[in-house]
Amino acid sequence: MAPPSTLPTGVPAEGPETTSSTPTATAGGVQQLLSADDVTRVVDRIAHQLIERAASSTSSGDGLSDLVLVGIPTRGAPLARRLAARIEAFTGTAVDVGTVDITLYRDDLRTRGVRALEDTRLPDAGIDGRLVVLVDDVLFSGRSVRAALDGLRDVGRPRAVQLAVLVDRGHRELPIKADFVGKNVPTSRTQQVRVRLAEVDGEDGVSVTDA
Amino acid sequence: MRRHLLESADLDRADATLVLDTAAQIESALAGREVKKLPTLRGRTVVNLFFEDSTRTRISFELAAKRLSADVINFSAKGSSVSKGESLKDTALTLEAMGADGIVVRHGSSGAPHRLATWVAGSVVNAGDGTHEHPTQALLDAYTIRQRLGRLEGVRVVITGDVLHSRVARSNVWLLHTLGAEVTLVAPPTLLPVGVGSWPVTVSYDLDAVLPQADVVMMLRVQGERMNASFFPSAREYSRRYGLDATRMAKLADDAIVMHPGPMNRGMEIAADVADSPRSTIVEQVGNGVSVRMAVLYLLLGGPA
Amino acid sequence: MTLLIKGAQPYGEDAVDILVRDGVIAAIGEDLSVSTGRTIDATGLVALPGLVDLHTHLREPGREDTETVLTGSRAAALGGYTAVHAMANTDPVADTAGVVEQVWRLGGDAGLVDVVPVGAVTVGLGGTQLAELGAMADSAARVRVFSDDGKCVSDPALMRRALEYVKALDGVVAQHAEEPRLTVGAQMHEGDRSARLGLTGWPAVAEEAIIARDVLLAEHVGARLHVCHVSTAGSVELVRWAKSRGVEVTAEVTPHHLLLTDAQAEGYDATFKVNPPLRTAEDVAALRAGLADGTVDAVATDHAPHAGEDKECEWSAARPGMLGLEQALSVVVDTMVDTGLLTWREVADRMSVRPARIGRLAHQGRPIAVGEPANLVLLDPAARAVVDPAALASKSRNSPYAGRELPGRVVHTLLRGELSVLDGKVQK
Ligand SMILES: [Zn+2]
């Protein structure tokens, strides 16, 4: 189940933030980090980086047939599809996309409770021997990524697994690092980072909320 | 989701749908995988407490629990302290002391899982109690119908056989009703409970009359011994009036399906060529049983203890 | 031995003083006083003749782990009883003069209530051969009520002979009306709930068919018949019909059938398993109406103690029966008095006068009047309390009223002028 979007309507959105200083909340406690246009730009940039990475990691061709983008639900899934669409737009080559639901691999079910599962779908060609890029919206403790890695291990043996995230907000609890980052956002632990995507939330944007 | 699964009568539509959706997700997550195992219930202990022999149900639960990485203990009443007169309560307290997180119980006495649930802290899953309920069977039946027909709302389900003594019938009546299906019970009046009039079903004594409108025909096992208590004159007469053979099956709509919870009495309530026909979901039901039971165990045991 | 009871309200009417001397009511009047003996203040308390139970299982001999004549007598006294009929389904069965005399002597030793043994109708409750009814009647126990309770005398020919035979003894057959072929494996009332709960049904017709047969038999042979624990609207109707024909039939209803319904089976707590089973709300209403108009003559407890392990188990494995002696009067206050269905005089009639008459107990069920035996109960009708099974005097804990708040507290009980209960405390 998708966590609800918490951006209150009527809060004026600020202009795009370009520095990497700790965001300070407005009077409403909500600060816009990325506008819809910013999200589009960031996705395009990561798409370009993926194209380069695919090409550099293969000895022949563009390497895109080797690449699989695997989104972590909820918002990693549409993000992966967007990246694939952009890559196809830039190169004319379709890229395989999948999703891996990590709920059954989480180590925090006992404290956070069970939740409804989301889709796990992998391309027919599988992931064995390929370059898998996990896609998620926010990188925080790293536990979701750890669960996704466990999930991938049970479905195949990729040549390599890399990680792309829209936002890296720090506070890692595991030795995990993203290979592609849309925006680094220093936050305090108590703040909440909200990513909104049109496919799930009806609009694009990233904001941070004081707890 | 509640702490226990004791009867389908207390599942609301949201709970029931959550189980079915979860089962579908688990099935697709595991589809085509070599490693059909998930770490979800690692460190949790599930006890299969079977006071009645039912190898198929026990194996189904065992596989479900193992695929979720739970530790599984099979506690069969035969040859154990239970057969030496230990009470259900003492058994429950023993399992409790051993730290069972979940107890899957099959018992010949209606309501035994309810009693058990009052004595243990863990979750209790009813795997069939007397002539009361068998909720995971109903969930897997509903799952199978949804999978085959794509829906449950408005689906016309005919349940035929020994409704009086059938926990499968009771569980299906409540669950299918909750999920929006229309249930018709068909049986000789002797095999319908007094009080069936209060159930949300249509009752008929005439199988031939209801078959043409049915989307699903679910055949219940009928024990031949029932004739000794005059529930019907003979197995032959029962089979003629209420058995599903090829002639009767021909009255079904083209996409109607035939279900049976097993074990079947071939030649009694169902003819062999019907059981083996493409309409039959009997083999799918077995496979779906594992997915549905995984979903139940995940939802009951996955969260905070 | 002198006891002065100040300010009691006989039958809930005007307050008076009651002077008890040598086991007899010596005077009733205003502002009585005595120079010696004890005086108790009974202001606000209702005085009734000591209650008489036609149907008690005291479990001795045989199951002294669940109840004894002594513990059952204590429970009875605390419930306001001065006489109880001890059912015959003990081990050994009370089917000989020897066993009934043993029970009778144990009752005398306890000395809290008159313990009146019921004799079995058939040898070993086997339903095939008459027990020595005459020998039991002639014994020191002076048995007048004969019953195979727990089992039905289902053989119609045998029932006919029993009805006929006890005429010579001024006795009565108390029938547990249950056609056994209709209740094979039965667990609860057969109806909507049994259908859903998957418990084998105990149909009303199994009780009613026997009552219909028995009243016709009693009419045919001109004998007295008593029907134990009627539980259905149809049974009340049959008894009413039989009485209108002049049949000498009497009937009893239990407190639990006046209060509880088959809804209690939800959750499968076997405390609520009883035989005959708890019925529907319609049946409860008919039983109350029958008791109110006198069709049903008596309230009888069917007090049935059981060990914990016989109740803390699967419903179908549990033994049927529930405690009743200590809460019977409270349940009657709750269901019949507070609802306006019975006056206090009628309570006395249904719980003392008529049961004593049915059991042919000359010194029980007598009016509160000068010269009568001082068998009395004094209760506070306004006091309400939550039933705590752990606090019961019975050796067993299978009370269906656990946790339920009920009105009416028995404060004092007198057996032949002796206080068996004082201030809610049993004296022996
Ligand atoms: Zn009885």
Image (tube, coloured by chain):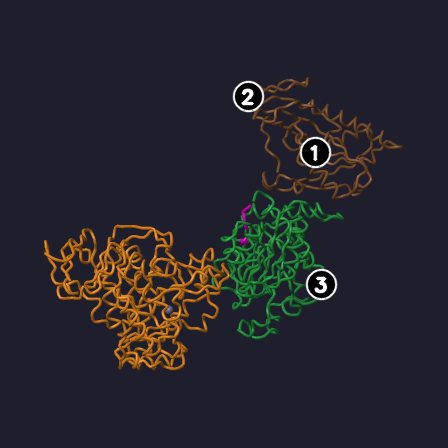
In the image, what residue occupies the spot 77% across and 41% down?
A123
At numbered mark 3, what does the secondary structure look like: helix, strand or loop? loop
Colour of chain B as rendered: green
Identified by mark 1, the residue type is Pro
Q: Up-down: is C237 above or below A153?
A: below
- What chain does mark 2 sit on? A
Residue A173 on image: x %, y %: 66, 31
Which label belongs to residue C394? none
User: Which is closer to the viewer, label 2 or label 1?
Assistant: 2
- What chain does mark 3 sit on? B
Mark 3 lies on residue: B276
A192 lies left or right of C154: right
Chain ID, orange in image: C
The answer to which of marks 2 and 1 sits earlier in the sequence is 2
Dot 2: few (<14), some (14–19), or many (≥20) neighbours within 10 Å? few
Chain ID, brown in image: A
